[in-house]
Image: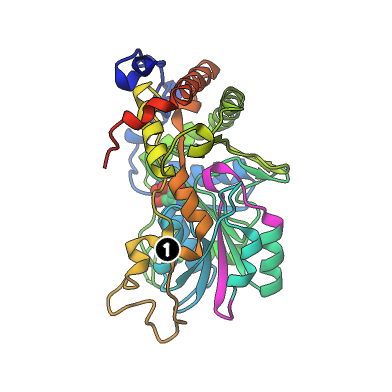
Amino acid sequence: MKSDLAIFGGAPVIPAGMIKPWPPIDELDRQYVLSSLEGTVHSFGPNCVELEKEFAAWNGNKYAITTNSGTAALHMAVAACGCGAGDEVIVPAYSWSSSATCVLHHNCLPVFVDIDWPTMNIDVEKIEAAITEKTKAIIVVHLHGLTVNMEKVLGLARKYNLKVIEDACQAHGATFKGKKAGLWGDCAAFSFNQNKCLCSGEGGMLVTDDEAINQAARMVWSFGETRTPVETRDYHAYALGWMYRNNDLTAAFGRSQLKKLDRYLAAQKENAAVLLEELKDIPGLILPVEPAGHGHNWYNFTVRVEPEAAGYQGQPDEFRDRVMQALQAEGVPVGVYQRFILPRMTVFQARNAYGHGCPWECVHARKIFYRPEDFPVAERHARNHFGLTYPLRLPNGPEVAEKIGEAFRKVFDNVAFLQDIPVKT
Ligand SMILES: Cc1ncc(COP(=O)(O)O)c(C=O)c1O
């Protein structure tokens, strides 16, 4: 019945307060953060040094550099891989904006490649056609915590002598063929932002096993200097550098959360499995996949809709938005990750990041224009998808995943009434 739906006045499936916020904070976090506060170094301090060692050990990398964001780590990666003015870097057409703007930050040009419908990641079969004599690197994004097929990417990188940067901002603990994200490419960027599987508020990490990349990244990280703040500095800018360092309080929080990360990831996986089971066989709802060999970390549980199969007459984005409104009223905090594919974003369409058309009009650059219609799969995905993050993370357990499943079934059982929901603009 229409009036059963919470959006039309019915009782919501999930009572207020049942879904707990992310991340869980306990005594260990308080201890770490307070001891940093009571210490004497509040900029790059001992917790930063330890976080680098501990994260490198956790992921299995030789080097790690703690940053104030994942975006900073991505820019450092582009620079440290030797990309410069006019060079081209391949990026997926669908991701977070900074997976591609990090390329602009170093005067290089992003070249977009469409995504693959089942995995939502860069279509590895389409990368080769985008490689030109100016291509320097490929940025792969393990979107929503599902790894890209890295064997295919590394095969191309070897063939064309390209660097591979992993945007692992969402991919803590995700694996391909049993090996973690961040261990495949020449270097990788992680984010420790609020929503990420490892949250220190804001923050990030560049990881690499390559000594030269580590050294080059350190220079970009701290004013173009060659020494870290805990070494004796000569305060000399040897190269163009930024200020991408982390601070001690944030690193202390990151350290205490890192101690719990394996537990967090195991719970996410378990909760996602429960939700997958709950949602199977709902007509018009396409569930996320975990292809053989890929270990998902379930950072984001992303679904797609098929209005016709669900019995709804109308456009996918309109249906998606109504389903989301109905679910939100049932108490499920769902959202759209990105409504725009990257080549559609104004920053790329305007082709004028630094004024005077730079870097696109740089003498070193090939003429590159972005046509959204060249990325039909990404466009379709942007209109069809929505997802959820923290409800499937600790302290939320399988009982929450079951309730979310119940809310989805309730909404999809009442598709006939969704037309009456005014679409928000
Ligand atoms: C795929 C991806 N890349 C890059 C970033 C940037 O990370 P940060 O917000 O830490 O700069 C994010 C997160 O926002 C992301 O999800």
Left or right of 155? Residue 327 is: left
State whether residue 34 appears in this view.
no
- Which quarter of the rendering shows the N terminus? top left
Decide whether residue 328 is among the magenta residues: no
Q: Residue at x 42, y 70 (%)?
A: 106
Left or right of 153? Residue 374 is: left
> What count of labels does the image hold?
1
| Residue ID for mark 1 | 343
Q: Position of residue 357 (x, y in %)?
A: 32, 78
Residue type (three-letter) at the residue carrying disc 1:
Pro
Q: Residue at x 59, y 81 (%)?
A: 133
Q: Position of residue 325 (x, y in %)?
A: 35, 31
Pick the residue in front: 344 or 23: 344
Above or below 38: residue 65: below
Residue found at the very far bottom of the displayed protein = 363
Above or below 246: residue 214: below
Above or below 49: residue 20: above
What colouring method underlies this structural image? rainbow
Residue at disc 1, secondary structure: helix
- Which quarter of the rendering shows the C terminus? top left
Pick the residue in front: 44 or 171: 171
Q: Residue at x 52, y 19 (%)?
A: 397
Decide whether residue 134 is among the magenta residues: yes
Pick the residue in front: 30 or 367: 367
State whether residue 124 appears in this view.
yes
Q: Residue at x 34, y 18 (%)?
A: 6
Q: Position of residue 379 (x, y in %)?
A: 46, 55
In the image, which residues are magenta? 132-151
Pick the residue in front: 273 or 32: 273
Disc 1 residue lies near ligand 1 with CB under 8 A = no
